[in-house]
């Protein structure tokens, strides 16, 4: 600490700071007396904002010392150069949020709100910040820095965009605060004439203060008629002298000697988690979410729509597949009245057994269209108008006698014939399977009518299904992977969106000046994210398993299913934070999320079983969290495995390990990357 006797509220001693190779402070000294207004002037880009951020402790000096009398963040009110306010809140809500962060009660906030409304001529307290003018929102920002009645007020260009008469009133108000309440105010401005009202000014250029003193003294010292011409004189003096002028009056010698010393960093003091602040953050973030209709739609309605889409569209049998047919045995419309009861070996039998196959296919929802000849049928398939063409020759049933009898007279012309397109393996597989089944059924019916055991036409094999008796469609075996994907993706979208706006718009940075810690913000976001995931996953589960009857075996393992969904949402939440931490722009963060979710969906067996992947890729896919969680969830619902099954234990533990790994990466990143969560505005 600096000795008690000195009358400065702020002292900067021999400060050095550079961004990469760009030197901003080059041995800068500054003294701000208690109970005064200090005007910090200088050309654009000379480092005024950087200096104020260093005073607040949000930025470190490379070397030198900053000493503040203020002990706590609540003793300081800081207005950054950018707005750094949540624009979806109203003016009133903004004051309530910051008032609560500063531990003010409702009555105190109300009194201060009325006071600031009159002083800063603010619009209606219910106006949303996004709906008011630039000048009005800057006044709200100024109001936020004055709200908690701080001892030291640091304002970065508070009067930009404000009309001259209101500017004058604001200065009068600030002067009154200094006189009546003994406040200390540091203010940067580009309007040199208004700096005349300050008690003391510092002229900053080329990394140092080239002059510091009362405006009148500076003007007379340089024989100028205004601050502006004094400043110009000083600039030309500095340009012709190589050694920078370093003013260091009133600097205690013991502090001057100490390089790299910092008496106290306000931002580092009192980092304890505070539940009042968490409550304020929760309220603010719920308000923000409720007003961001697109985000609300994306994290609540979209998961429900997508689950419904998934159940309706993925993995079901193909419907109304169009097949061209030429039946020389009978008109296919007459098959409707076909009754197969006679044995085809009977002499007077008039059966058209092709109808058995045709009716079978119609029963399985095929659209059969009669074509006039084989050439047309094949051509239509080649032109992709039909998926297949089936031909039954004229004496099909008659010749079937010989086929069953294994008669050597049976020739290839007597066979039914299928010409089909292979451009889509799934269509091809389904048609082949259905037509094969139709023909097997035809043979079985034929044998049965002739009192021959139909088993003769079935496969001599017994199939026993161990797991997944109720799995009928591909979608049944990917439903759990899809739900795991939803838990991951929609949580990540929430965290990346909120965190990016907190970071890029400087909202978190500003809340931190009011004492908020990153942990508190993350905790509040985490609570909201969990509430969202529980809500939309419950609805998605009801849609998938109750409405669309995806098979599920009810066991105690379902508890682990719920646990896995929650862990997947945590992984999504953490990954969203990671994307927000590394991305240089808002939109890129969302692209990272979409890209990673899509890749996982493709690799995790959600689209196609991973058993079809190359060995190395499969090894990687096996380790993906969506795969681990989705597979384990599938094992629980389709195989009925419970929480004590080794596979369930391994799957759950490995998924949880992913969450821990992401957490460790985030902690590590926060330590090495200074702008992980906050961009200086
Ligand atoms: N995060 C950053 N990374 C790199 N350089 C930076 C960063 N922030 C500021 N600078 C550079 O540091 C210098 C000082 O910037 P600063 O914003 O402090 O200037 P200023 O005096 O407040 O300017 P203005 O009056 O235009 O607001 C500028 O050259 C700027 O380009």
Image (cartoon, rainbow, N blue to C red):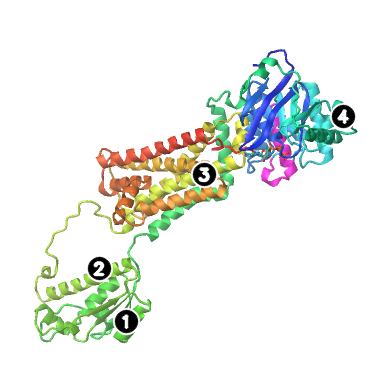
User: Residue beneath label 2, please?
Assistant: 433
Q: Residues within 10 Å of mark 3 (few under 14, many from 20)?
A: many
Ligand 1: quadrant of the figure? top right
User: Residue beneath label 1, please?
Assistant: 378
Q: Most prominent secondary structure in the magenta stretch?
A: helix
User: Residue beneath label 3, please?
Assistant: 496
Q: Residues within 10 Å of mark 4 (few under 14, many from 20)?
A: some
Give the CA separation, mark 4 to mark 1. 100 Å
In primary-sequence order, the first of circles 4 and 2 is 4
Task: Report the span colored magenta.
Answer: 126-148
Please check the rendered image and state whether residue 508 is part of the magenta-colored stretch, yes or no. no
Residue at the spot 61% in from the left edge and 38% down from the top edge = 20
- Tag nearer the camera, 4 or 3: 4
Contact? badges 2 and 3 (CB < 8 Å): no
Q: Secondary structure at mark 2?
A: helix
Q: Secondary structure at mark 1?
A: helix
* Of residues 48 and 568, the one drawn nearer to the viewer in this rendering: 48
Please check the rendered image and state whether residue 132 is part of the magenta-colored stretch, yes or no. yes
- Tag nearer the camera, 1 or 2: 1
- Tag nearer the camera, 2 or 3: 3
Q: Position of residue 95 (x, y in %)?
A: 67, 34
Disc 2: residue Cβ within 8 A of ligand 1's nearest atom? no
The numbered disc on residue 222 is 4
Residue 107 in view here: no
Disc 4: residue Cβ within 8 A of ligand 1's nearest atom? no
Q: Position of residue 564 (x, y in %)?
A: 36, 42
Contact? badges 1 and 2 (CB < 8 Å): no
* Of residues 22 and 437, the one drawn nearer to the viewer in this rendering: 22
């Amino acid at each position: 600490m600096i000795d008690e006797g000195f009358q400065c509220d702020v002292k900067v001693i021999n400060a050095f700071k550079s961004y990469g190779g760009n030197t901003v402070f080059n041995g800068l000294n500054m003294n701000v007396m208690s109970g005064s207004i200090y005007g910090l002037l200088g050309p654009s880009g000379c480092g005024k904002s950087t200096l104020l951020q260093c005073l607040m402790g949000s930025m470190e000096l490379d070397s030198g010392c900053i000493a503040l009398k203020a002990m706590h963040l609540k003793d300081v009110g800081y207005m950054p150069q950018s707005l750094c306010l949540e624009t979806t809140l109203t003016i009133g809500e903004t004051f309530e949020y910051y008032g609560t962060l500063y531990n003010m009660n409702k009555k105190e906030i109300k009194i201060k709100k009325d006071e600031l409304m009159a002083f800063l001529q603010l619009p209606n307290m219910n106006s949303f910040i996004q709906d008011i003018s630039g000048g009005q929102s800057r006044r709200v920002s100024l109001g936020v820095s004055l709200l908690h009645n701080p001892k030291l007020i640091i304002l970065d260009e508070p009067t930009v965009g404000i009309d001259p008469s209101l500017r004058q009133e604001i200065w009068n108000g600030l002067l009154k605060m200094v006189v009546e309440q003994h406040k200390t105010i540091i203010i940067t401005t580009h309007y040199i004439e208004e700096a005349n009202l300050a008690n003391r000014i510092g002229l900053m250029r080329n990394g140092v203060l080239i002059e510091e003193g009362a405006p009148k003294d500076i003007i007379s010292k340089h024989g100028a008629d205004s601050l502006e011409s004094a400043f110009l004189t000083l600039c030309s003096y500095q340009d012709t002298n190589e050694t920078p002028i370093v003013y260091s009056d009133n600097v205690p010698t013991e502090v001057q000697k100490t390089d790299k010393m910092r008496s106290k960093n306000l931002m580092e003091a009192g980092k304890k988690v505070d539940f009042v602040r968490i409550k304020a953050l929760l309220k603010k973030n719920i308000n923000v979410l409720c007003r961001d209709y697109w985000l609300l739609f994306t994290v609540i309605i979209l998961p429900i729509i997508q689950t419904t889409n998934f159940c309706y569209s993925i993995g079901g049998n193909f419907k109304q597949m169009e097949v061209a047919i030429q039946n020389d045995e009978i008109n296919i419309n007459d098959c409707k009245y076909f009754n197969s009861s006679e044995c085809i070996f009977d002499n007077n039998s008039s059966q058209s057994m092709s109808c058995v196959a045709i009716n079978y296919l119609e029963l399985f929802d095929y659209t059969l269209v009669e074509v006039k000849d084989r050439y047309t049928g094949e051509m239509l398939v080649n032109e992709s108008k039909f998926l297949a063409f089936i031909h039954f020759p004229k004496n099909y049933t008659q010749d079937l006698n010989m086929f069953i009898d294994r008669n050597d007279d049976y020739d290839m012309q007597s066979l039914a014939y299928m010409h089909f397109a292979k451009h889509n393996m799934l269509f091809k597989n389904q048609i082949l399977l259905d037509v094969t089944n139709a023909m097997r059924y035809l043979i079985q019916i034929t044998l049965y009518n002739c009192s021959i055991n139909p088993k003769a036409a079935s496969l001599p094999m017994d199939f026993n299904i161990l797991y997944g008796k109720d799995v009928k469609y591909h979608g049944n075996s990917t439903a759990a992977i899809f739900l795991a994907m939803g838990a991951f993706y929609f949580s990540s979208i929430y965290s990346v969106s909120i965190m990016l706006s907190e970071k890029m718009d400087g909202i978190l940075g500003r809340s931190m000046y009011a004492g908020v810690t990153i942990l508190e913000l993350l905790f509040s976001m985490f609570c909201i994210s969990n509430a969202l995931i529980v809500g939309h996953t419950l609805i998605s589960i009801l849609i998938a398993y109750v409405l669309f009857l995806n098979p599920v075996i009810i066991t105690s393992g379902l508890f682990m299913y719920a646990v896995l969904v929650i862990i997947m949402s945590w992984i999504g939440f953490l990954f969203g934070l990671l994307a927000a931490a590394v991305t240089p722009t808002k939109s890129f963060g969302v692209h990272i999320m979409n890209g990673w979710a899509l890749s996982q969906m493709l690799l995790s067996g959600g689209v196609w079983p991973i058993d079809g992947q190359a060995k190395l890729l499969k090894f990687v896919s096996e380790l993906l969290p969506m795969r681990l969680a989705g597979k384990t969830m599938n094992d629980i619902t389709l195989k009925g495995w419970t929480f004590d099954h080794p596979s369930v234990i391994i799957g759950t533990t490995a998924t949880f390990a992913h969450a821990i790994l992401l957490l460790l990466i985030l902690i590590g990143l926060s330590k090495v990357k200074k702008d992980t969560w906050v961009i200086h505005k």
